[in-house]
Image (cartoon, helix red, strand yellow):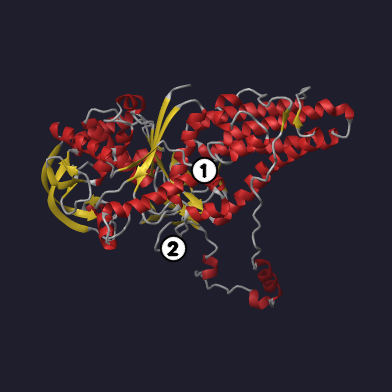
Amino acid sequence: MPNKSFYITTPIYYPSAKLHIGHAYCTTIADAVARFKRLAGYDVFFLTGSDEHGQKIQQAAEKEGVTPLEYVDKIVAGFQALWQRLHISHDDFLRTSEPRHHRVVQEFFRRAKAKGDVYKGEYTGLYCTPCESYWTELQLDENGCCPDCHRPVEKVSEEAYFFKLSNYADRLLKHIEENPDFIRPVSRRNEMISFIKQGLDDLCISRTSFDWGVPVPDDEKHVIYVWFDALTNYVTAAGFFDDPEKFKKFWPADIHLVGKEIVRFHSIIWPAILMSLDLPLPKQIYGHGWLIVDGDKMSKSKGNVVDPNLLIDEFGADAIRYFLLREIALGQDGNFSRDALIGRINADLANDLGNLLHRTLNMIGKFQNGVIEARAMKSATDEALMADAAEMVAAYESGMENMEISPVIKKLWAFIGRANKYIDETAPWALAKDPAKKAELATVMYNLAESLRVISILISPFMPETAPKIWAQLGMKPEFAAARLADVKAWGGVPAGQHIGEAAQLFPRIEVEKDEAPAKQEKQKAAPKQERKAEKAEDGVITIDEFKKTELRVAEVTAAERVPKTDKLMKLTLSLGDETREVVSGIADAYTAEELVGKHVILVANLKPAKLRGIVSHGMVLAASDGEKLRLIETDMPAGSVVR
């Protein structure tokens, strides 16, 4: 599809002084999609940036004795350096402090006001400075704090401008319901439908208590409130004022990729603003899940914030990118752990991919003097490898078009495993000993080199540093940057007679220091039997050791359906961040399937599987009952969190 345009955005990130792996996760997803689209022949525009206005920034700058711009300059430089280290291929980095953006924000304000959608009034409400959000009493959490960050709110009363968000509730609801892919995944879509149906209040869009922001046109004691300002960045970068041809080409955006906690702003407030100005809505808002660390949400207070720069220093950018994209199903919460990362590097990158490349190049060098000779025959084993490659390429393309990044990577790695198996099936070392098998050997070695050529192109959206290294080691010309998805749709792209390049190890295996567990186990075995015997529980009472055997995890309901021919059974599909399970629960008379999607529930995760009405149930969700009424126990913690 040459020359077809594609526009993808990440949120413009708040300039936090502490970079964390969550910033890297969202941007790496967007980069992988952008790279795939370029590979497929699209003209891509990929935007990221920084959201630099607001009271919180001004207060932090005052505390350090610098201007707000000086304060954000050094932090934004850290973001830009990280994106470079992660090989993020963005086409624009927009800072909301830039004059080009101020001009667009003020024009949006003027047009909405001229249409009658902006008016001045008095605002009294509860404001969360860290989230820069207003809340009602009913929206606060059980401690009277912000429902998003759970920190205290303050009562604010000031003159303000308002945007008539309530005017667009019906149009928004109609658009969401008529366009099922407008908000993805479905759990986010259901949440937004429910939010709109509760009623929308008009939106406060200016403040007078600070001045670090875009001034309101003709009333400069007001600055435009952060979401009306920040969301407008997507059209600023697309050339709304400066480049009409560019704007015509790239707007509406194809995908706004955002964290699930800000889907509401992007799928309700932003479309309403665009409706007010009679501009097309973005085609899709995709809310990805949270990244949690060892089963717990990242938090400065918990001390579990992971610095991506340190990870890159230790493991390299491509290993981090691969892990984040492969390990986490897009849309679901995902777990990051150092042990899991090292496991993936050793198993997938060093063993699977690294071994395939090393074995192939080593045998071409040893058996064919470093020359990839022409195929001379085709056996059933060769045909099977080529068929598997063609099936994998088709699945790769359709999966990436549908944002199924993790399944695509798993499919690609299955083919890498298939190519390694092909080596064992054909035994090139045995063929090399028999001069009569020279043609067969040449074919096998060619097919392995061709497999690696295809693999190098297809891994490039995920591992942009590794892909050209494989290309160079195969001796491929021209430069890797010229490779396209179309180049893998026919087998035979490696030129016969080509000399391989210089072989080098891609991913050295990481040796993990052995812990003291084996020694401890031996010591326990040697202990007297009576000392090791568990304390016997009293009738009806369990010991703490017995309770610890129960593994409780937070799970997100991603799909639900009634079990046919039953009154109470509901089949639930649950995400635990790093895995998906099916559970059968007797809650069908208390909830509809639609009500369940998106809920975060408590799962007994280590319960022995049981078959109910032909369905294997892997665990049990917890519910409370006061007789007739049955309700699930819910939490706002991310999927995969451990209940302690």
Please tell me which residue is depicted at 66% across the width and 50% down the height of the picture.
508
Please tell me which residue is depicted at 24% across the width and 31% down the height of the picture.
275
On the question of residue 470 being in view, the answer is yes
Q: x, y (%) of residue 154?
A: 21, 59
Q: x, y (%) of residue 171?
A: 24, 31
Q: Nearer the viewer, residue 259 or 599?
A: 259
Side of 280 relative to 537 (left or right): left
Say which mark, if any, is on residue 304: none
Side of 125 relative to 584 (left or right): left
Q: Secondary structure at mark 1?
A: helix
Give the CA distance from mark 1 to mark 2.
24 Å
Q: Secondary structure at mark 2?
A: loop
Q: Which residue is mark 2?
A: 303
Q: Residues within 10 Å of mark 2 (few under 14, many from 20)?
A: few
Side of 376 relative to 54 (left or right): right
Please tell me which residue is depicted at 47% across the width and 35% down the height of the picture.
33
Q: x, y (%) of residue 261?
A: 35, 47
Q: Nearer the viewer, residue 141 or 351?
A: 351
Q: Is residue 179 above or below residue 575?
A: above
Q: Amino acid at mark 1?
A: Leu
Q: Amino acid at mark 2?
A: Gly
On the question of residue 603 being in view, the answer is no
Q: Is residue 560 above or below residue 622?
A: above
Q: Which residue is mark 1?
A: 325
Dot 1 or dot 2, earlier in sequence: 2
